[in-house]
Image: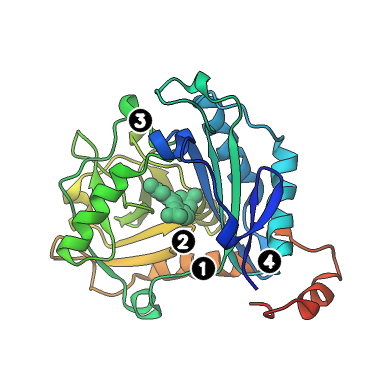
């Protein structure tokens, strides 16, 4: 059975899930999105993702046609319709269809799309051994040009860096800001362990303030690991004891080499491994249930194609 895609309150099979070519999301990248995951029948950090989406809507003066509570329910219903308990969820809110021309006032109604599908991760080997990454020439957008805290449909900045990654043959790369500080990967935040302390880039330095990042910071505090937000440059990364990346798609993954410099002893670090383990454990038990208590098995068993859980 084809996946069912939510568009403006109705569900369409994947093949018929279409939006207008006059949608300013398509014409100008005018809109915002979220990438969310469900684990084990629960949506991970759903409220945080919905909040970030509405913050992006506020900043871009996009009036969503649904309330946060309705959006939350629509996300859960999309998962139920597709019988997915382990999923990658993509919420896209674009400015909507309108005449040509930049002016958002040409678009009377935003388009809301929710896609729930299976997830693709990096190969297991990279989680076991850690990633080798490089820094690239493409600078992260400055806050004053297009604030990276908004998960806007304008991802060309990150895609330009991804093109460099592909060209150089690396699965992920690090982007610097215009001052030379390390900001983040193309779709992940960065953490260092330096002199025993856990460091991550401040939200104000030109990054997406990742929900996985915030969870790792909280877990570190709970585990008694000293942590703080700090600006750091390439030298700090090269000489760090440990390094890892976090994001909804990648979860948390060690970095063992940056620009040819081996990080620590070239293996995923001890603190990295402890935090990744704690994070994984939390994702199995926390989150918003997709099905009402007791209903999940019945729903899952009767549906076509089985379930991931
Ligand atoms: N930085 C950037 C630039 C991102 O795009 C993160 C950090 C990590 O944030 P979270 O909240 O996920 O911990 C992201 C996340 C996609 C996709 O479809 C992209 C992301 C997440 C999920 C899916 O490409 N980016």
Query: Separation of disc 3 and disc 2 at Cα?
Result: 23 Å
Q: How far apart are marks 3 and 1 (CA)?
A: 28 Å
Find residue 235 and report its horizontal and vertical position in percent.
16, 50
Q: In this view, does 216 lie above or below 49?
A: below
The answer to whether the residues at label 1 and label 2 have Cβ atoms under 8 Å apart is yes
Separation (CA) of disc 4 from disc 1: 14 Å
As helix, strand or loop, the secondary structure at mark 1 comes to: loop
Q: How crowded is mark 1: few (under 14 residues within 10 Å), some or many (20 or more)?
A: few
> Is 237 above or below relative to 309?
above
Kindly identify the residue that appears in the image at 46 percent across and 33 percent down. 24
Q: Does the residue labelled 2 lie within 8 Å of ligand 1?
A: yes
Residue occupying the point 56% across, 39% down: 53
Q: What element carries label 3?
A: helix
> Could you tell me residue 240's position as x and y percent?
24, 58
- In space, the residues marked 2 and 4 are separated at their CA atoms by 20 Å
Image quarter (top left, top right, bottom left or bottom right) of the N terminus? bottom right
On the question of residue 60 being in view, the answer is yes
Q: Which residue is drawn at 33% across and 35% down?
A: 205
Q: Name the residue under label 1.
A: 119
Q: Residues within 10 Å of mark 2 (few under 14, many from 20)?
A: some
Q: On the image, numbered disc 3 is attached to which residue?
A: 146
In the picture, measured across the screen, residue 309 lies left or right of residue 203, that is right
The label on residue 82 is 4
Q: Quadrant of residue 19?
A: top right
Residue 288's disc is none
Q: Mark 2 points at which residue?
A: 249
- Left or right, residue 270 beside residue 97: left
Could you tell which of marks 2 and 4 lies nearer the N-terminus? 4
Residue farthest to the right, as pictured: 294
């Amino acid at each position: 059975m084809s996946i069912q895609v939510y568009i403006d309150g109705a569900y369409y099979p994947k093949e018929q899930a279409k939006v207008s070519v006059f949608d300013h999301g398509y014409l100008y990248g005018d809109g915002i999105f979220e990438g969310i995951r469900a684990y084990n029948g629960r949506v991970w950090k759903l409220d945080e993702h919905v909040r970030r989406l509405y913050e992006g809507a506020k900043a871009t003066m996009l009036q969503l046609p649904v309330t946060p509570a309705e959006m939350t329910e629509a996300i859960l219903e999309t998962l139920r319709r597709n019988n997915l308990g382990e999923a990658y969820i993509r919420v896209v809110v674009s400015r909507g269809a309108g005449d040509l021309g930049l002016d958002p006032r040409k678009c009377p109604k935003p388009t809301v799309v929710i896609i729930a599908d299976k997830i693709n991760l990096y190969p297991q080997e990279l989680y076991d051994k850690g990633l080798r990454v490089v820094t690239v020439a493409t600078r992260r957008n400055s806050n004053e040009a297009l604030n990276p805290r908004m998960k806007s449909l304008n991802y060309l900045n990150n895609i330009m860096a991804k093109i460099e990654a592909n060209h150089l043959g690396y699965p992920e790369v690090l982007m610097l800001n215009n001052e030379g500080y390390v900001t983040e990967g193309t779709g992940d935040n960065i953490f260092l362990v330096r002199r025993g302390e856990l460091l991550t880039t401040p939200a104000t330095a030109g990054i997406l303030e990742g929900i996985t990042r915030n969870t790792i910071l909280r877990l570190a505090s709970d585990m008694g690991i000293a942590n703080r937000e700090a600006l750091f440059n390439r030298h700090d990364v090269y000489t760090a004891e440990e390094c890892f990346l976090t994001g909804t798609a990648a979860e948390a993954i060690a970095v063992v080499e940056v620009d040819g410099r081996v990080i620590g002893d070239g293996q995923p670090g001890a603190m990295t491994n402890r935090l990744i383990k704690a994070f994984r454990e939390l994702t199995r038990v926390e989150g918003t249930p997709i099905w009402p208590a007791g209903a999940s098995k019945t729903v899952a068993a009767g549906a076509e194609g089985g379930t991931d859980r």
